[in-house]
Image (cartoon, helix red, strand yellow):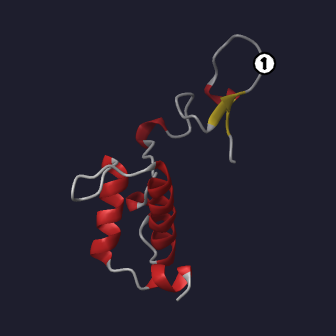
Amino acid sequence: MTYEELIERLDPSVYRNLKQAIELGKWPDGRPMSREQREISLEAVIYYENKHNVPETDRTGYLDRGEKAGTACDPSVRRKQSGDQIDPDQFVEVKA
């Protein structure tokens, strides 16, 4: 069985347990996760979310920017380099 097949067949309860283990840094039985276990689990969770079309808002690492989206408080926005006056039109969205 390949890694891709394993993730495709992963039970949703196992996915939820992995996700919770990553968040808490420990397995459901209380044992701490090693750095390597956490990295591998995180890769599996992200891969699962992509394969199973989990809504973007429910995915690992999603940040709801809410009212701050597109403003100077949004880290994906940088200010144009011109003058000291603050003008909302001076901000441009940075897409990585």
The amino acid on which the numbered mark 1 sits, given as a three-letter code, is Ser
Asked where in the image residue 10 lies, by quadrant, the reply is: bottom left
Horizontal side of residue 93 vs 33, given as left or right:
right
Name the secondary structure under disc 1: loop
Q: Residue at x 50, y 61 (%)?
A: 40
Residue 41 drawn above or below residue 90: below
The residue sitting at 30% across, 66% down in the picture is 16
Disc 1 residue crowd, few under 14, some 14–19, many 20+, Cα 10 Å: few
Q: Residue at x 69, y 48 (%)?
A: 96
Q: Which residue is mark 1?
A: 82
Position above or below: 95 against 15: above
Residue pictured at 52% horizontal, 89% vertical: 1
Percent of width and height locating residue 37 = 45, 57
Residue 61, how many percent across, how many down?
46, 51
Extreme residue toward the top, this view: 84
Please state which of residues 42 and 78 is positioned toward the viewer in this rendering.
Answer: 42
Image coordinates of residue 65 in percent, x first then y, are 45, 42
Residue ranking furthest to the left: 29
In the image, taking residue 46 as reference, residue 77 lies left or right, namely right
Tell me where residue 80 appears, x and y as whole percent: 74, 26
Q: Is residue 34 left or right of residue 24?
A: right
